Image (cartoon, grey):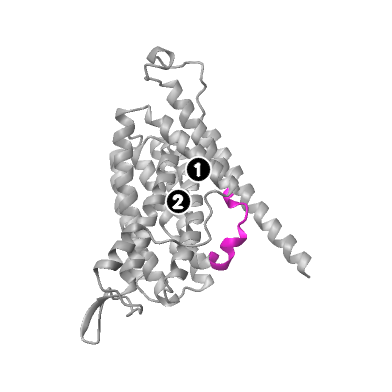
Amino acid sequence: MAETPLAFEIATFAVLAVFFVVDLFVIGRKPHVPSTKECVQHIAFFVVMALIFGGLMWFFAGSKPAIEFYSGWLTEYSLSIDNLFVFVIIMSNFAVPKQLQKFVLSIGITIALVLRGVFILIGAAIISRFTWVFFLFGAFLIVTAIKLVTGGDEDEEYHENGLIRALRKVIKITDEYDGEKLRTVKNGAKYWTPMLIVFLTIGTTDVMFAFDSIPAIFGLTKDPFIVFTSNVFALLGLQQLYFLLGELLDKLVYLPLGLSVVLGFIGVKLIMEALHGNSLPFLNGGQPISWVPEVPTWLSLVVIVLAIGGAALASVIKMRTMKANEK
């Protein structure tokens, strides 16, 4: 299923490992609230790196894998921005001090990368054996798209999941933070700090995010290498994006609509692919349905750019209109 040369993949993993270590464990380990300038510089760097990577992929592997990467990266990046809403709620709910939020995001993003890597491996194995799973992926994405449009997926408050509630019952947890420590001593007894709960919350929350993002990316490419690199480049710089957007997240009013168009389109594309390569005995006698057209890779990229770009532009216009009316 791989579409890129092995040497290129090995070099990519080496460079991305360096990026991640520096971004999360060198820069991210310094407890501070990053300035706007610092955030913009970091985000711009990783965006440029993603564009350059796509260009290198075009050179070494051809236009199709490169377009698949750009499509996947834009989709995953857009979903990551939407997921920042939840991160804001989690940080607020657990009263994480501002100077510690960067560190928390660093660990949370690392957990996200590991979990998504597992999901990608599982997804690739399932798809290679059971092509009919595209019907399930497609239907799930279409339902998710409808929820985004109707508001069925919105929740203004964070609700602790069962794992966190059970954990609170069996271990001692303080209500106060002790820097970056997971354990602290209070009145001569050892306690876990709220940092443990925050890490587990962000980690388990990202599992839910993966149920949206992984089927979406597999709807654009079947190459696990492209799927993984799209996710990595979408996660790099996410902590800086969190601080840069901050209060502006709730101003991106049309982002859910743009995402719904993307997810709906990919969902339909997956179902069309499943029909085109059909093997289910109760559909067309188990034979592929040849009249179903294949969606070209370039069309996927065009739809994603127009949907996300249009949503962002419409949000900016609405923000300016609202500000003008307030004067």
Numbered disc in front, either 2 or 1? 1
Write down the residue under mark 2: 50
The image position of residue 190, as x and y in percent, is: 22, 79
Please provide the residue range marked out in magenta: 245-256
Taking the spot 52% from the left edge, 22% from the top edge, the residue there is 293
**In which quadrant is the N terminus drawn?**
top left
Labelled disc at residue 144: 1
| In-front residue for pair 47/121 | 121
Sequence-earlier tag: 2 or 1: 2
Q: Picture coordinates of residue 86 (x, y %)?
A: 47, 60
- Asked if the stretch drawn in magenta spans residue 307, the answer is no
Q: Relative to 303, does residue 327 appear above or below in the rendering?
A: below
Q: Secondary structure at mark 1?
A: helix
Residue at the front extreme of this rendering:
169
Residue 63 appearing in the image: no
Residue in the picture at 47% in, 70% down: 92
Q: Quadrant of the C terminus?
A: bottom right
Q: Which of the 4 image quadrants contains residue 326?
A: bottom right
Q: Position of residue 263 (x, y in %)?
A: 51, 41
Does residue 265 lie above or below 259 as drawn? above
